[in-house]
Image (tube, rainbow, N blue to C red):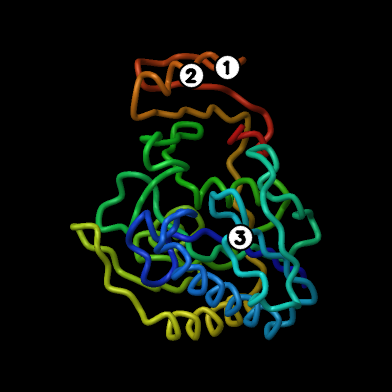
Amino acid sequence: MHVYILTDMEGVSLVTKWEQVQQGHPFYAKYQPVLTAEVNAAIEGAFAAGATRVVVNDGHGSADYNLLWDRLDPRAELERPDSASNIFPGMDETFHAMLMIGYHSMEGTPNAVMPHTQSHTNVLYYEINGRKIGEIGQMALIAGGYGVPVAYVSGDAAAVAEARQFLGEDLPATIVKQGHANGGATSLHPNEAAKRIRRDVEAALALSRRDSFVIPGPYEVKCAFKSKALADERAGQPGVERIDELTTSRTVTSVKAILT
């Protein structure tokens, strides 16, 4: 069994502020060990469930790896996305499942921890074929293009609820924190979060293979921006249509191109 682990950072335990997940800020280094521990827990759970290969995609936006590679379980392989057109460099049809660790909900979600879609400063929402979709749905859809289903998600309560809207109410998951209306959160202790992730991943992979997430193409991708200047910039790209002052649209035939 081959398992692909995709990571983000906003959805790990204790994190509630942007400065905690942005390289160059003094708080950032305190949360890299939290992310690494939660990913290690998922790796352990995957191997305990019978995985023979685990690839970890350090998917949080940054200039370098967010995971502390010297603390990462050495049984896992490690990679980074190289572009929006190649989010999963090492994924192929041999993978049994994808796990999503440290995920967050889409922009505008109430009682969520740091909800956003791609960029909290730039994007209001994405739509694919008329349905608003955040990063969880986007990543699941691209993985589905390889025939790989999402078998498990960890993150805050709002992220788990969103994942289950797209991927099924029975989707195995671990809630590591509960967001509040004021932007704060009540979080598990990181040690307890890791313990639950390890347990829940092993249980999730012991279940029957889930269906891949599929939306039939072609794909009309609408993006609403937070400023006219950002929409102007996108509208100048080939194949992009201007819908209104803040919104652009384009149509692609491959699910792997929905973020390009």
Q: Is residue 121 above or below residue 47?
A: above
Q: Amino acid at mark 1?
A: Gln
Q: CA distance from mark 1 to mark 2?
A: 7 Å
Q: Position of residue 145 (x, y in %)?
A: 69, 46
Task: Tell me what residue is drawn at x 48 percent, y 73 percent.
Answer: 34
Q: In the shown orientation, is residue 109 left or right of residue 195?
A: left
Q: In the shown orientation, is residue 112 left or right of residue 85?
A: left
Q: Amino acid at mark 2?
A: Glu
Q: Report the quarter where the C terminus lies.
A: top right
Q: Is there CB contact under 8 Å for labels 3 and 2? A: no
Q: Is there CB contact under 8 Å for labels 1 and 2? A: yes
Q: Secondary structure at mark 3?
A: strand
Instruction: Return the residue at label 2.
Output: 233
Instruction: Return the residue at label 3.
Output: 6
Task: Tell me what residue is drawn at x 34 percent, y 54 percent.
Answer: 114
Q: Position of residue 143 (x, y in %)?
A: 66, 51
State which quadrant residue 59 falls in: bottom right
Q: In the shown orientation, is residue 76 left or right of residue 21?
A: right
Of the pair 203 and 91, the residue shown nearer to us: 91
Q: Which mark is residue 237?
A: 1
Q: CA distance from mark 1 to mark 3?
A: 29 Å
Of the pair 243 and 165, the residue shown nearer to us: 243
Q: Amino acid at mark 3?
A: Leu
Task: Tell me what residue is drawn at x 73 percent, y 72 percent.
Answer: 76
Give whichever of discs 1 and 3 has the lower sequence position: 3
Q: Secondary structure at mark 1?
A: loop
Q: Report the quarter where the N terminus lies.
A: bottom right
How many numbered discs, if any? 3
Give whichever of discs 3 and 2 has the lower sequence position: 3
